[in-house]
Image: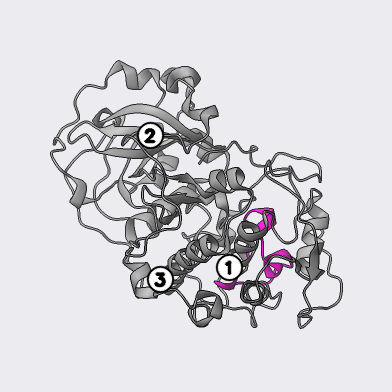
Amino acid sequence: MGQKGSAPGEILNDEHKPREDSKEPSNRHESSDDEDAGEVIEPPSDVKFANKQRIREDQVQQDGIGEGKELPDTLSLSFSHTKTRISPADFKVLKLLGQGSFGKVYLVTHRADDCIYAMKVMRKDVLVKGDQVTHTVTERFVMSHLQHPNLVKLRFAFQTSTRLYLVMDFARGGELFYHLKQSGRFSEDRVRFYTAQIALALEYLHTHSVVYRDLKPENILLDEHGNIQLTDFGLSKPYVSDKEGARTFCGTPEYIAPETLVNQSYGASVDWWSLGTLAFEMITGLPPFYNSNVKVMYWQILNSKVVFPDFVSPDARDLLKRLLRKNPERRMDHTTIRRHPFFRSINWDDLYNLTIPPPFKPTLHTLTDVRYFDPVFTKETPGESFVPETELRRIDRDTQAAFEGFTFVDHSRLGNIREEVGSVPEALVEMDIVGSPIEHMGGY
């Protein structure tokens, strides 16, 4: 949410697009922790480097959720049946919040109770063409089954003949990327709070055998109080242990762990590497191995030592060294991170219960205040990118079956939703968010 991406499969050069807020930190000191120093390892020769923020899986069969595997006991696919029908007609579009390669996110209000939500709208033909069906089903699956104070909550999921919809709580504080871009870097107290909340969210996901795989500032939101909420679970992977369960090369270049680059089987450890990279970026203003040439950046991830600016405290340095160990067997994880001296002031129970005042509270005047979202999107009239229904590529029946069971309703927010779908307002058609209603009831 909040940025535009390249189309999948696009062949681009090796130059990695510089981050708009990139500033080379000065007065850096090389880490003396050399336990991971080793021979130079070139990235796999068959990897196609692309000028885009995110690298997705090329082969769904290699690393998808539809492989016939049994789910671990900690994860359940079933949920209760509902006869309540939800459609685009139940929501009024207010603003465009963000746009990506595969969909758009709108600020909407629910007509039945006037609640404000963020609604992600994805065209099925685009998802099919980009081989993103499995990722979308995974996102819906993770969001509907896992609940944590630091994960964005899914309230509704539904579909029409041409589109998929995910309706989530609106995190009014905007993306962490926006705030980091505005500030350049954060104080260590602020980094401590954010890193601890993210660690709780990752610990929860890993406990339920899910690895996140795309931790970065763009995928982290702040609620109206300033608490962290992770979003965008399209690259998440169920059935993964702490040590293994995935092999696919995917993620965002700056945050990819060494074991992913060398095609090793990996597990939850890749998320702790990404957390170390993110924490370093929040403290210094730039990821530790950033380079505009993505091949050079990958080489540095595999071989270079971490270099710290003078202003980084000893406790922060030690934490980052432990999170950024190239050997995943020696990397810090949920079993040790809570006890690290950098977090000595954190009461983890209070943090989980959201009773610790965040170091930054967004200044908001209304429930629909979008000041912390990119004005490139929020100032756009949602209907400007209208694609007539007749011009959308129809999906065949077999492909439609892949989306069966997508519908989800959080009954705590059900309210007064009507049993039958009424007429679709013209405004929604003009904004390119509706199609012919399709209802799927029951489990996955």
Q: Nearer the viewer, residue 241 or 59?
A: 241
Which mark's residue is nearer the viewer, 3 or 2? 2
For numbered disc 2, what is the local secondary structure? loop
Circle nearer the viewer, 1 or 3: 3
Q: Residue 79 location, x and y as percent? A: 25, 58
Q: What mark, if any, has residue 246 been given in the picture?
A: 1
At x 61%, y 44%, the residue is 181
Residue 249 visible to an observer of this rendering: no
Q: What numbered label is drawn on residue 208?
A: 3
**Figure check: 381 above or below 106:** above
Task: Using a 10 Å C-alpha cutoff, classify the residue at mark 3 as few (fewer than 14 neighbours), some (14 to 19) or many (20 or more).
Answer: many
250 inside magenta stretch: yes
Residue highlighted by disc 2: 369
**In the rendered structure, which amino acid carries the disc numbered 2?**
Asp
**Residue positioned most to the front:** 311
Residue 357 showing in the rendered view: yes
- Could you give the CA–CA distance between mark 1 and mark 3, rounded to whole angstroms? 15 Å
Q: Residue furthest right?
A: 40
Quote the CA–CA distance across marks 1 and 2.
40 Å
In the picture, residue 270 is in which quadrant?
A: bottom right
Tell me which label, 1 or 2, sits earlier in the chain: 1
Q: Is residue 23 left or right of residue 102?
A: right
Q: Secondary structure at mark 3?
A: loop
- The residue under the point 75% across, 69% down is 306
Q: Left or right: where does residue 382 sit relative to residue 303?
A: left
Mark 1 vs 2: CB contact within 8 A: no
Q: Tell me which residue sits at (39%, 46%) in the image.
A: 171
Main secondary structure found in the magenta portion: loop
Q: Is residue 213 left or right of residue 296?
A: left
Question: Start and end of the magenta stretch?
Answer: 247-270
- Residue at image position (50%, 21%) is 385
**Could you say where residue 195 lies in the image, as x and y percent from the top left?**
52, 65
